[in-house]
Image: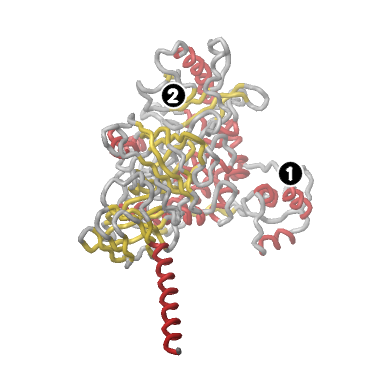
């Protein structure tokens, strides 16, 4: 009896162990997904989100990695940190890190980031590693038959910028949530950047979607940032523009981009400059130029761009100043009965604006919103933007809050050749006698566009930088809007829309590591300046003292961190120099200690704010601004009652 009991117990244990084994196998060996959209070749495919194998779009094939001498899975930030589902798209059994994957099925495989493991696939032993991004989202776009004849999406789109296609896809956020909204159209974009190997694109979704937490929209520009090794210059200046209150500052996110199941690199998904509901310029109606009877309205909204490269395919006019001005909206086709009349109206508004700005002492506020013009001047000056006044300079014509028709200098766009990135053109720099273009010191906009002989120019940003209305406004805008944001960037106290440099780095670093491990170059040729050293600048706001280091800080330009730090340090150093230039002209529009700017000194107690800072409390943006009583970007003191009122509101 005892023997029978022992045998019975043993068999029960075996059955329990077998059940556990079956359960464990059920977790790791699964039926093939119902469909995988982007199976373009035999290989092993990883899914971007664990536990969602029925999702058909967010799969990516392993890809060869020269630096790691083996295959690599470039996983999005929404992937699990230690396990990944891998699908075997072949008729042979595969093994990855000790896990068997039967033909045309998937299994969950354990992994450690950047640690190569053994794999067996299609008769051979392989090495495979795993990288995982830190970006705010991943975007998958799939169409293996983009041209209708079996050509894949990347190949077809790359043949000609005018080529476009629809697609399926997935947007995966950092938490692993998936949006499978289909793509209405994807096509190439950009001028110089289009001819780079890493292509930029415009993507229009069928319905409004959010990418990485952005406000929902249908149209996005995917910037490759292939000439900016920091991957961040556009992001810095777009976010800063938003932080200082520029109208229509494009929101954007770091994303990882996958096309037809292949990782394509780290991109910046930005709100496309477009009009209408759900777009960046949501209050601009692109049909508002028409009366109900089809005739052209007496006054109407439009968005235009100073664009030296405008050609026959663009809807543009030659301004009296000699600039080519492209209309972005309304954008009419040749043959439209209103084609010439709409252009003529826009020209009749732009030419007086240029001529007024050109007159140094002329007042401007009846033609343009002066604050927005001042801010776009400061953005271009801060960045030493090579394209300043030449291209990607937008103006929006509409009614202000009082019903007056005028221009707004917005939206901002295209700053990859800023913040110490470009060397510039030697002949042009010599002609305008600029010898410090790559340095964070020295004026820029007032020289850009000057001719070799007469110093005359048709560059509107050049004239803006010399106009007394703008120059008188610039110190106030600089110290009360720009300085607090840039100090927050440097001091790790992120503002609402402009983060600290540490936060930007934490978001982009993992994505950048994948981008450069994949094979996109850190250095892209002679147009990019030497980023290996920089004489850092600082400014003491209490003593109004500017200092530039005599010993240069060194940067490792063979690493992403070195390139990122150079860009961030250049921005901060440039801001220090500009503060030193504007300081003597700055007259505060507030009284020291007037936290709510009502003309009464109400700050008497620093205790609360000191406790809040010590306790790690996060103040709302309005509370932060109110607590910075001398507007130097540093929270100092605030009245307790006023703080409570702000937080309560």
Circle 2 sits on which residue?
A: 326
Which quarter of the figure is the N terminus placed in? bottom left
Can residue 450 be seen in the rendering of this structure?
yes
Count residues near mark 1 (Cα–Cα under 10 Å), then give few for <14, some for 14-19, many for 20+. Answer: some
Q: Where, by quadrant of the figure, is residue 528 drawn?
A: top left
The spot of residue 393 in percent (x, y) is 47, 31
Q: Where, by quadrant of the figure, is residue 314 drawn?
A: top left
| Left or right of 437, for residue 301 | right
The spot of residue 154 in percent (x, y) is 31, 40
The residue sitting at 51% across, 54% down in the picture is 175
Residue 597's disc is 1
The spot of residue 170 in percent (x, y) is 43, 44
Q: Where, by quadrant of the figure, is residue 405 drawn?
A: top right
Q: Nearer the viewer, mark 2 or mark 1?
A: 2
- 189 or 547: nearer the eye? 189
As drawn, 522 above or below 1 = above
């Amino acid at each position: 009896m005892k023997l029978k009991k022992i045998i019975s117990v043993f068999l029960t244990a075996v059955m329990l162990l077998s059940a556990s084994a079956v359960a464990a196998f059920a977790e790791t060996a699964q039926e093939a997904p119902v469909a995988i959209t982007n199976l373009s070749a035999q290989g092993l495919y990883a899914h971007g989100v664990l536990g969602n194998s029925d999702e058909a779009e967010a799969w990516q094939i392993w890809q060869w990695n020269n630096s790691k001498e083996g295959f690599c899975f470039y996983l999005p930030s929404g992937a699990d940190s230690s396990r990944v589902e891998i699908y075997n798209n072949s008729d042979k059994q595969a093994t990855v890190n000790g896990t068997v994957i039967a033909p045309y099925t998937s299994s969950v495989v354990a992994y450690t980031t950047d640690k190569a493991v053994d794999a067996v696939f299609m008769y051979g032993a392989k090495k495979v590693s795993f990288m995982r991004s830190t970006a705010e989202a991943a975007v998958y776009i799939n169409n293996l038959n983009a041209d209708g004849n079996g050509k894949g999406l990347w190949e077809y789109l790359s043949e000609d910028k005018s080529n476009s296609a629809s697609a399926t896809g997935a947007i995966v956020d950092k938490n692993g949530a998936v949006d499978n909204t289909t793509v209405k159209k994807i096509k190439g974009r950009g001028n110089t950047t289009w001819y780079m190997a890493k292509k930029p694109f415009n993507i229009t979704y069928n319905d409004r979607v959010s990418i990485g937490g952005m406000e929902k929209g249908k149209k996005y520009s995917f910037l490759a940032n292939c000439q900016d090794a920091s991957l961040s210059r556009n992001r810095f200046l777009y976010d800063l523009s938003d932080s200082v209150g520029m109208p229509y500052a494009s929101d954007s996110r770091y994303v990882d981009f996958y096309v037809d199941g292949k990782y394509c690199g780290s991109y910046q998904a930005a709100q496309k400059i477009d009009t209408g509901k759900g777009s960046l310029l949501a209050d601009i109606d692109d049909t508002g130029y028409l009366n109900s009877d089809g005739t052209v309205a007496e006054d109407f909204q439009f968005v235009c761009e100073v664009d030296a490269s405008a050609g026959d395919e663009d809807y543009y006019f030659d301004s009296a100043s000699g600039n080519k001005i492209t209309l972005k909206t309304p954008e009419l086709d040749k043959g439209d009965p209103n084609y010439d009349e709409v252009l003529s109206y826009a020209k009749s508004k732009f030419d007086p604006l240029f001529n007024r700005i050109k007159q140094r002492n002329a007042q401007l506020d009846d033609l343009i919103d002066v604050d927005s013009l001042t801010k776009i001047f400061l953005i271009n000056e801060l960045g030493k933007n090579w394209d300043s006044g030449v291209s990607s300079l937008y103006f929006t014509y509409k009614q202000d809050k009082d019903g007056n028709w005028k221009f707004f200098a917005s939206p901002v766009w295209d700053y990859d050749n800023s913040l110490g990135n470009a060397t510039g053109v030697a002949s042009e720099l010599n002609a305008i006698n600029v010898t410090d273009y790559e340095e964070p010191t020295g004026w820029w906009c007032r020289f850009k566009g000057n001719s070799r002989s007469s110093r005359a120019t048709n560059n509107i940003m050049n004239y803006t930088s010399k106009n007394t209305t703008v120059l008188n406004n610039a110190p106030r805008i600089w110290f009360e809007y720009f300085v607090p944001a840039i100090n927050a960037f440097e001091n790790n106290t992120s503002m609402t829309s402009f983060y600290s440099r540490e936060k930007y780095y934490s978001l982009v670093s993992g994505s950048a590591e994948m981008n450069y491990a994949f094979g996109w170059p850190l250095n892209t040729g002679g147009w990019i300046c030497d980023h290996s050293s920089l004489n850092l600048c600082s400014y003491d706001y209490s003593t109004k003292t500017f200092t530039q280091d005599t010993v240069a800080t060194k940067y490792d330009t063979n690493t992403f961190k070195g390139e990122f730090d150079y860009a961030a340090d250049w921005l901060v150093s440039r801001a220090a120099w500009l503060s030193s230039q504007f300081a003597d002209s700055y007259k505060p529009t507030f009284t020291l200690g007037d936290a709510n700017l009502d003309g009464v000194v109400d700050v008497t107690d620093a205790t609360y704010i000191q406790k809040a800072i010590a306790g790690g409390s996060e103040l709302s943006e309005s509370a932060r601004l109110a607590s910075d009583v001398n507007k130097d970007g540093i929270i100092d003191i605030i009245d307790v009652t006023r703080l409570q009122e702000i937080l309560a509101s």
